[in-house]
């Protein structure tokens, strides 16, 4: 069974069933999928292999960057520059047009960040990212003691003059292990999930970039391996989130429509292709592609 339908509306959003196309395999643990709309290619990381790869229909799988500091979550900023969360360096970085890498954040009040994990960039260029401790563990990162005594969510505000972004701000420090994050369809709310507590929280985004609220919005409940991890929203405002058994699909009102039951343990996903209806799924040793009926929200590049 490729899907678990909990609400009839799931058929209109995802479909009656899905077909999994394995486009790449043979990796240690895949993460950080990101689609490039203009050039039509996918970036994804093999964190334990310290290898950031590129996939396209024409070229298949090639190397984008190796080593890559065990990069995890990726995003484009409004200028089309690559923003990366790096596990082994505990840094958030930006790749400049000439290939140089700029560190945007690495410490909070003099102490090294845990291991930036996932990232989302708003329309103004403000960068929001989660900072759990997973990148300091064996296999997924580089084992070493933590310097911070909490796991937080941060924001880096853009420098409207085009230079280096302004200073780092801590938005929340009361998570077990913050992980995936995404914006609502109207860009007025920020969803952040907590892998340790198996739920999704929602914050109100204020005009100055700060946040309010933070209540639990939904829980990922079901059978199978998996926990909240990668998270994205589609063009109708539905929220997709990794969870037990695969990818859980919620309405904008936090109603769970069903689960896409992925063949392997699933860490993340990203929409892509020309119509935005292909969902690229990073699932342990492989990358899969399925089709959804509602297009995802693509970052334009």
Image (cartoon, rainbow, N blue to C red):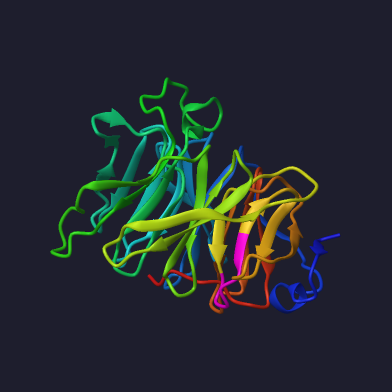
Query: In the image, residue 216 lies at what x, y percent?
Result: 57, 53
Q: Residue at x 79, y 71 (%)?
A: 7
Which one is nearer the viewer's eye here, 182 or 77? Answer: 182
Give, as a single range, the part of the protein colored magenta: 234-240
Q: Residue reaching furthest right?
A: 1
Residue 235 inside the magenta-drawn segment: yes
Extreme residue in the top direction: 145
Residue depicted at x 77% and y 66%: 19
Percent of width and height locating residue 292? 67, 73
Position of residue 179 relative to residue 150, above or below, is below
Would residue 195 be found to the left or right of residue 246 on screen? left
Residue 125's place in the image compared with 50, above or below, is below
**Residue 128: % across, % down:** 37, 54
To which quarter of the image does residue 124 belong? bottom left
Quarter of the image where the C terminus is located? bottom left
| Residue 50 x, y percent position in the rendering | 47, 36
- Residue 86 vertical placement versus 40 (above, below): above
Query: Which image quarter is the N terminus in?
Result: bottom right
Q: Is 47 a magenta residue?
A: no
Q: Main secondary structure of the magenta part?
A: loop
Instruction: Give the residue displayed 18% in from the left and 59% down from the top.
Output: 159
| Residue 43 visible in the shown view | no
């Amino acid at each position: 069974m490729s899907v678990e339908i909990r609400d009839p509306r799931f058929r209109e959003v995802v479909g009656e069933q899905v077909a999994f196309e394995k486009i790449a395999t043979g990796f240690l643990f895949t993460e950080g999928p990101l689609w490039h709309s203009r050039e039509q290619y996918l970036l994804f990381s093999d964190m334990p292999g310290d290898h950031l790869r590129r996939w396209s229909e024409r070229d298949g799988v090639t190397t984008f960057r190796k080593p890559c500091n065990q990069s995890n979550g990726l995003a484009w900023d409004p200028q089309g520059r690559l923003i990366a969360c790096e596990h082994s360096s505990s840094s958030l970085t930006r790749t400049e047009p000439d290939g140089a890498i700029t560190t945007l954040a690495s410490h909070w009040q003099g102490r090294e960040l845990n291991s930036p994990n996932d990232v989302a960039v708003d329309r103004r260029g403000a960068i929001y990212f989660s900072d759990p401790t997973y990148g300091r563990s064996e296999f997924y990162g580089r084992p070493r003691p933590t310097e911070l005594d909490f796991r937080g969510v941060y924001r880096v505000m853009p420098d409207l003059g085009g230079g280096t972004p302004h200073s780092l701000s801590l938005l929340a420090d009361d998570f077990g292990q913050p992980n995936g994050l995404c914006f609502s369809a109207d860009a007025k709310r920020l969803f952040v999930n907590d892998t340790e507590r198996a739920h999704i929280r929602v914050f109100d985004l204020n005009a100055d970039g700060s946040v309010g609220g933070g209540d639990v919005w939904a829980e990922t409940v079901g059978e199978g391996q998996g926990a909240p991890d990668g998270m994205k929203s589609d063009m109708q405002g539905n929220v997709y989130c990794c969870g037990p058994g695969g990818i859980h699909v919620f309405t904008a009102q936090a109603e769970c429509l069903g689960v896409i039951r992925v063949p392997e343990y699933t860490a993340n996903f990203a929409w892509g292709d020309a119509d935005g209806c292909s969902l690229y799924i990073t699932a342990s040793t492989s990358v899969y592609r399925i089709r959804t009926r509602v297009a995802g929200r693509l970052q334009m590049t």
